[in-house]
Image (cartoon, grey):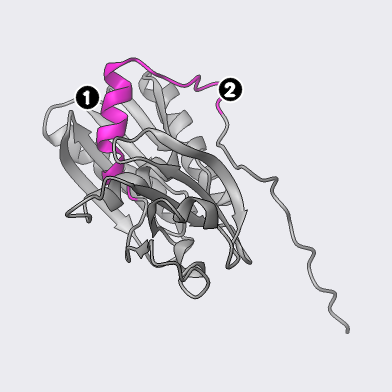
Amino acid sequence: MLLNIETSTSICSVALSEGEKLLFSVEDTQGQNHAALLSVFVEKALEFGKQTGGKIDAIAASAGPGSYTGLRIGVSTAKGLCFGFDVPLIAIDTLQVINAAAKRKIDVFEKNALLCPMIDARRAEVFCALYRNDGTVFGEIRAEIITENSFADILENNIIYFFGNGSNKCVPLLQHHNCRFIDNVFPLAENMITLANEKFQQKQFADAAYFEPFYLKEFQATKAKKILL
Protein backbone atom coordinates (compact mmCIF):
# COMPACT_ATOMS: atom_id res chain seq x y z
CA MET A 1 0.00 0.00 0.00
CA LEU A 2 1.48 3.32 -1.13
CA LEU A 3 0.52 6.86 -0.16
CA ASN A 4 0.99 9.19 -3.16
CA ILE A 5 1.39 12.97 -2.72
CA GLU A 6 1.29 15.51 -5.59
CA THR A 7 1.75 19.24 -4.89
CA SER A 8 3.94 20.47 -7.76
CA THR A 9 1.40 22.91 -9.25
CA SER A 10 -1.69 24.77 -7.99
CA ILE A 11 -3.46 21.42 -7.53
CA CYS A 12 -3.07 19.55 -4.25
CA SER A 13 -3.86 15.82 -4.37
CA VAL A 14 -3.35 12.62 -2.41
CA ALA A 15 -4.04 9.02 -3.45
CA LEU A 16 -3.81 5.68 -1.70
CA SER A 17 -2.95 2.68 -3.84
CA GLU A 18 -2.28 -1.03 -3.59
CA GLY A 19 -0.22 -2.35 -6.48
CA GLU A 20 -1.83 -0.82 -9.59
CA LYS A 21 -5.19 -0.38 -7.86
CA LEU A 22 -6.48 3.04 -6.74
CA LEU A 23 -8.05 2.75 -3.28
CA PHE A 24 -8.69 6.39 -2.37
CA SER A 25 -8.19 9.78 -4.00
CA VAL A 26 -8.82 13.38 -3.02
CA GLU A 27 -7.82 16.64 -4.70
CA ASP A 28 -8.27 20.40 -4.59
CA THR A 29 -8.08 22.50 -7.75
CA GLN A 30 -8.92 25.90 -6.27
CA GLY A 31 -5.39 27.27 -5.94
CA GLN A 32 -2.41 27.34 -3.61
CA ASN A 33 -4.04 25.82 -0.52
CA HIS A 34 -1.45 23.09 -0.05
CA ALA A 35 -0.27 24.13 3.42
CA ALA A 36 -3.81 24.04 4.79
CA LEU A 37 -5.16 21.05 2.89
CA LEU A 38 -2.36 18.50 2.49
CA SER A 39 -2.35 17.28 6.09
CA VAL A 40 -6.15 16.96 5.98
CA PHE A 41 -6.00 14.94 2.75
CA VAL A 42 -3.26 12.69 4.15
CA GLU A 43 -5.29 12.05 7.30
CA LYS A 44 -8.33 11.07 5.22
CA ALA A 45 -6.24 8.68 3.10
CA LEU A 46 -4.62 7.09 6.16
CA GLU A 47 -8.01 6.66 7.83
CA PHE A 48 -9.33 4.93 4.72
CA GLY A 49 -6.29 2.66 4.68
CA LYS A 50 -6.78 1.81 8.35
CA GLN A 51 -10.39 0.82 7.66
CA THR A 52 -9.24 -1.66 5.00
CA GLY A 53 -6.83 -3.25 7.46
CA GLY A 54 -3.76 -2.43 5.37
CA LYS A 55 -0.52 -0.74 6.32
CA ILE A 56 1.56 1.87 4.51
CA ASP A 57 4.62 0.35 2.81
CA ALA A 58 6.06 3.52 1.27
CA ILE A 59 5.39 7.21 0.60
CA ALA A 60 5.60 8.49 -2.99
CA ALA A 61 6.05 12.21 -3.62
CA SER A 62 6.09 14.24 -6.80
CA ALA A 63 9.67 15.51 -6.87
CA GLY A 64 9.63 18.32 -9.43
CA PRO A 65 10.14 20.39 -11.37
CA GLY A 66 7.30 22.68 -10.41
CA SER A 67 6.22 25.24 -7.83
CA TYR A 68 8.97 25.88 -5.28
CA THR A 69 6.52 26.27 -2.39
CA GLY A 70 4.30 23.40 -3.46
CA LEU A 71 7.21 20.99 -3.81
CA ARG A 72 8.65 22.00 -0.42
CA ILE A 73 5.32 21.33 1.28
CA GLY A 74 4.76 17.99 -0.45
CA VAL A 75 8.26 16.59 -0.01
CA SER A 76 8.65 17.76 3.60
CA THR A 77 5.30 16.14 4.45
CA ALA A 78 6.35 12.92 2.70
CA LYS A 79 9.64 12.86 4.61
CA GLY A 80 7.87 13.29 7.93
CA LEU A 81 5.53 10.41 7.10
CA CYS A 82 8.46 8.21 6.08
CA PHE A 83 10.13 8.73 9.46
CA GLY A 84 6.83 8.36 11.32
CA PHE A 85 5.87 5.07 9.64
CA ASP A 86 9.49 3.90 9.18
CA VAL A 87 8.93 3.34 5.46
CA PRO A 88 10.95 4.35 2.36
CA LEU A 89 10.49 7.43 0.19
CA ILE A 90 9.77 7.16 -3.54
CA ALA A 91 10.51 10.25 -5.65
CA ILE A 92 8.55 10.60 -8.91
CA ASP A 93 9.46 13.02 -11.72
CA THR A 94 6.53 15.46 -12.03
CA LEU A 95 6.74 15.62 -15.83
CA GLN A 96 6.39 11.84 -15.97
CA VAL A 97 3.26 12.12 -13.83
CA ILE A 98 1.76 14.56 -16.36
CA ASN A 99 2.96 12.30 -19.17
CA ALA A 100 1.11 9.32 -17.69
CA ALA A 101 -2.10 11.35 -17.51
CA ALA A 102 -1.85 12.48 -21.14
CA LYS A 103 -1.22 9.01 -22.57
CA ARG A 104 -4.64 7.94 -21.36
CA LYS A 105 -6.21 10.57 -23.63
CA ILE A 106 -4.45 9.57 -26.86
CA ASP A 107 -6.42 6.94 -28.80
CA VAL A 108 -3.96 6.45 -31.67
CA PHE A 109 -0.29 7.26 -31.14
CA GLU A 110 1.54 7.94 -34.43
CA LYS A 111 4.89 6.20 -34.98
CA ASN A 112 6.83 9.47 -35.17
CA ALA A 113 4.99 11.19 -32.30
CA LEU A 114 6.52 12.55 -29.10
CA LEU A 115 4.99 13.62 -25.81
CA CYS A 116 5.87 17.00 -24.29
CA PRO A 117 4.55 17.63 -20.76
CA MET A 118 4.87 21.28 -19.71
CA ILE A 119 4.71 23.09 -16.38
CA ASP A 120 4.19 26.85 -16.24
CA ALA A 121 7.41 28.49 -15.00
CA ARG A 122 6.15 32.10 -15.10
CA ARG A 123 6.37 34.66 -17.91
CA ALA A 124 7.15 32.98 -21.27
CA GLU A 125 9.02 30.07 -19.72
CA VAL A 126 8.03 26.44 -19.12
CA PHE A 127 9.62 23.35 -17.62
CA CYS A 128 9.39 20.56 -20.16
CA ALA A 129 10.83 17.32 -21.52
CA LEU A 130 10.20 15.08 -24.54
CA TYR A 131 9.25 11.42 -24.24
CA ARG A 132 8.63 8.60 -26.68
CA ASN A 133 5.47 6.51 -26.33
CA ASP A 134 7.38 3.77 -24.48
CA GLY A 135 8.39 6.27 -21.78
CA THR A 136 12.02 6.62 -22.82
CA VAL A 137 13.50 10.12 -22.88
CA PHE A 138 13.89 11.88 -26.24
CA GLY A 139 14.75 15.31 -24.78
CA GLU A 140 15.99 15.93 -21.25
CA ILE A 141 14.16 18.11 -18.70
CA ARG A 142 14.87 21.80 -19.27
CA ALA A 143 13.52 25.31 -18.84
CA GLU A 144 12.35 26.61 -22.22
CA ILE A 145 11.38 30.14 -23.22
CA ILE A 146 8.56 29.68 -25.73
CA THR A 147 8.86 31.51 -29.08
CA GLU A 148 7.58 30.83 -32.61
CA ASN A 149 10.77 28.85 -33.24
CA SER A 150 10.57 26.57 -30.21
CA PHE A 151 10.91 22.86 -31.14
CA ALA A 152 11.11 23.85 -34.83
CA ASP A 153 13.84 21.37 -35.75
CA ILE A 154 12.08 18.46 -33.99
CA LEU A 155 8.66 19.32 -35.45
CA GLU A 156 10.01 18.93 -38.99
CA ASN A 157 10.19 15.15 -38.51
CA ASN A 158 7.97 14.47 -35.52
CA ILE A 159 4.47 15.09 -34.28
CA ILE A 160 4.58 16.57 -30.77
CA TYR A 161 1.73 16.41 -28.28
CA PHE A 162 1.88 19.39 -25.90
CA PHE A 163 -0.02 19.32 -22.60
CA GLY A 164 0.12 20.47 -18.99
CA ASN A 165 -0.55 23.97 -17.62
CA GLY A 166 2.48 25.37 -19.47
CA SER A 167 1.22 24.32 -22.89
CA ASN A 168 -1.29 27.20 -22.98
CA LYS A 169 1.64 29.49 -23.79
CA CYS A 170 2.39 27.46 -26.90
CA VAL A 171 -1.05 27.57 -28.51
CA PRO A 172 -0.78 31.08 -30.04
CA LEU A 173 2.91 30.71 -30.93
CA LEU A 174 3.42 27.19 -32.26
CA GLN A 175 1.51 26.93 -35.53
CA HIS A 176 3.40 24.02 -37.14
CA HIS A 177 1.15 21.34 -38.68
CA ASN A 178 2.81 18.69 -36.50
CA CYS A 179 1.72 20.36 -33.26
CA ARG A 180 -1.01 18.67 -31.23
CA PHE A 181 -2.49 20.07 -28.00
CA ILE A 182 -4.27 18.11 -25.29
CA ASP A 183 -6.43 20.09 -22.87
CA ASN A 184 -7.07 19.50 -19.18
CA VAL A 185 -4.05 17.36 -18.34
CA PHE A 186 -2.89 17.84 -14.75
CA PRO A 187 -0.40 16.21 -12.39
CA LEU A 188 -2.55 14.25 -9.94
CA ALA A 189 -1.55 11.79 -7.23
CA GLU A 190 -3.61 9.05 -8.86
CA ASN A 191 -1.46 9.37 -12.00
CA MET A 192 1.60 8.51 -9.90
CA ILE A 193 0.40 5.02 -9.03
CA THR A 194 1.98 2.99 -11.85
CA LEU A 195 5.25 4.91 -11.67
CA ALA A 196 5.43 4.60 -7.88
CA ASN A 197 4.56 0.90 -7.91
CA GLU A 198 7.31 0.20 -10.46
CA LYS A 199 9.89 1.96 -8.30
CA PHE A 200 8.64 0.17 -5.19
CA GLN A 201 8.96 -3.23 -6.85
CA GLN A 202 12.47 -2.37 -8.03
CA LYS A 203 13.35 -0.91 -4.59
CA GLN A 204 14.32 2.42 -6.15
CA PHE A 205 14.05 4.54 -3.02
CA ALA A 206 15.25 8.07 -2.26
CA ASP A 207 17.15 8.96 0.90
CA ALA A 208 14.45 10.50 3.09
CA ALA A 209 17.05 12.31 5.20
CA TYR A 210 18.78 14.14 2.36
CA PHE A 211 16.41 14.17 -0.61
CA GLU A 212 15.53 17.59 -2.05
CA PRO A 213 12.97 18.38 -4.76
CA PHE A 214 14.20 19.08 -8.29
CA TYR A 215 13.45 22.79 -8.65
CA LEU A 216 15.34 23.21 -11.96
CA LYS A 217 15.69 26.92 -11.22
CA GLU A 218 16.69 28.84 -8.12
CA PHE A 219 13.84 30.27 -6.07
CA GLN A 220 13.50 34.01 -6.66
CA ALA A 221 11.74 35.99 -3.97
CA THR A 222 10.11 39.25 -5.00
CA LYS A 223 10.68 42.39 -2.98
CA ALA A 224 7.65 43.89 -1.34
CA LYS A 225 6.58 47.23 -2.74
CA LYS A 226 7.22 50.22 -0.48
CA ILE A 227 4.10 51.76 0.99
CA LEU A 228 4.14 55.52 1.21
CA LEU A 229 2.46 56.82 4.33
Q: Nearer the viewer, residue 41 or 93?
A: 93
Instruction: Work out which quarter of the rendered image holds the C terminus and state it.
Output: bottom right
Mark 2 or mark 1, whichever is nearer to me? 2
Residue 9 position within the rendered picture, expressed as x and y whole percent measured from the top left: 47, 55
Asked if the stretch drawn in magenta spans residue 13, the answer is no
Q: Nearer the viewer, residue 168 or 148?
A: 148
Residue at the farthest bottom position: 229
User: Which residue position is annotated with label 2?
Assistant: 210
Residue type indicated by callout 1: Lys
Q: Nearer the viewer, residue 213 or 119?
A: 119
Local crowd size for mark 1, using a 10 Å CA cut-off: few (<14), some (14–19), many (≥20)? few
Q: Check the image and report above or below for 94 versus 202.
A: below
Number of marks in the rendered image:
2
Residue at 51% in and 49% down = 128
SS at mark 2 in the image: loop
Q: Is residue 133 left or right of residue 19?
A: right
Residue 78 position within the rendered picture, expressed as x and y whole percent measured from the top left: 43, 34
Image quadrant in which you'd find residue 226: bottom right
Residue 185 position within the rendered picture, expressed as x and y whole percent measured from the top left: 33, 59
Task: In the rendered structure, find residue 21 and report the number of the disc placed on it.
Answer: none
Q: Check the image and report above or below for 76 versus 185.
A: above
Whole-Å distance between the Cαs marked 2 and 1?
25 Å
Residue at the farthest left position: 52
User: Which residue position is annotated with label 1?
Assistant: 55
Instruction: Work out which quarter of the rendered image holds the N terminus and state it.
Output: top left
Q: Is residue 216 left or right of residue 188?
A: right
Q: Which callout, 2 or 1, points at the residue further toward the start of the chain?
A: 1
What's the magenta region?
188-211
